[in-house]
């Protein structure tokens, strides 16, 4: 069983009233994050292990990310952006076969 380290993403909550959730938008670098980028609903979490988001755990490489706040009426804020984030959710290959030698 491989062990993949947690990759935590944290951001301060929006100070706007009536925020019900946040969305994470992701693009492979060097592509910019846009409203059409692949996105993931974060619920009301402002701290999350990226490997627990279905679909994110399969992403390896360098990415640009943006987070938006979503209010109760469905309106979304501008992006809080981070660029050139390297994600690695792939465990290394195991060592070779173990042998035991009696001397």
Image (cartoon, helix red, strand yellow):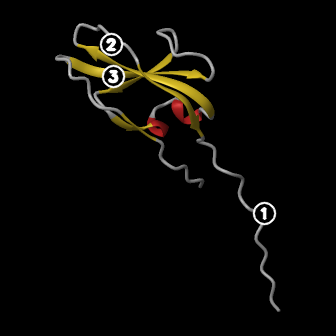
Residue 103: x and y in percent read: 83, 92
Residue under circle 3? Answer: 22
Between 63 and 56, the one lying in front of the other is 63
Mark closest to the chain's N terminus, 1 or 3: 3
- Determine whether the residue tagged by mark 2 lies in a helix, strand or loop: loop
The Cα–Cα distance between marks 3 and 2, rounded to whole angstroms, is 9 Å
Q: Given this view, does label 3 or label 2 mark the residue nearer the observer? A: 2
Q: Position of residue 11 (x, y in %)?
A: 34, 32
Q: Is 57 drawn above or below residue 32 in the view shown?
A: below
Which mark is drawn over residue 96? 1
Give the number of the disc on residue 69. none
Task: State the residue at coordinates (23%, 19%).
Answer: 19
Q: Residue reaching furthest bottom?
A: 103
Instruction: Indicate left or right for 60 with 43 as reference.
Output: right
Q: Does dot 1 land on a helix, a strand or a loop?
A: loop
Vertical arrangement, residue 90 with respect to residue 67, above or below? below
Question: For the residues marked 1 and 3, what is the alpha-carbon distance in whole angstroms?
Answer: 44 Å
Q: Which mark is residue 77?
A: 2
The quarter holding residue 43 reads top left
Task: Give the image location of residue 69, x and y in percent.
Answer: 31, 18
- Nearer to us: label 1 or label 2: 2
Helix, strand or loop for disc 3? strand
Nearer-N-terminus badge (1/2): 2
Other residues around mark 1 within 10 Å, as few (<14) / some (14–19) / many (≥20): few
Q: What residue is shown at x 61% (from left), y 31% (from top)?
A: 62
Q: Counting other residues with Cα less than 10 Å from the Cα at mark 3, is it few (<14), some (14-19), or many (20 or more)?
A: many
The residue located at (52%, 14%) in the rendering is 37
Q: How many C-alpha atoms fall within 10 Å of the one at disc 2: few (<14), some, or many (≥20)?
A: some
Residue occupying image coordinates x 80% and y 89%: 102
Please identify, in this view, whether the residue under mark 1 or under mark 3 is nearer the observer.
3
Is residue 18 left or right of 34 when viewed as pictured?
A: left
């Amino acid at each position: 069983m491989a062990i993949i380290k947690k990759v935590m993403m944290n951001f301060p909550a929006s100070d706007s009233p009536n925020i019900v959730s946040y969305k994470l938008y992701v693009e492979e670098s060097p592509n910019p994050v846009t409203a059409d980028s692949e996105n993931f609903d974060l619920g009301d979490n402002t701290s999350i292990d990226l490997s627990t988001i279905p679909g994110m755990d399969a992403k390896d490489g360098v990415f640009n990310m943006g987070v938006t706040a979503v209010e109760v009426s469905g309106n979304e804020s501008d992006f809080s952006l981070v660029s050139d984030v390297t994600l690695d959710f792939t465990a290394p290959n195991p060592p070779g076969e173990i042998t035991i030698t009696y001397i």
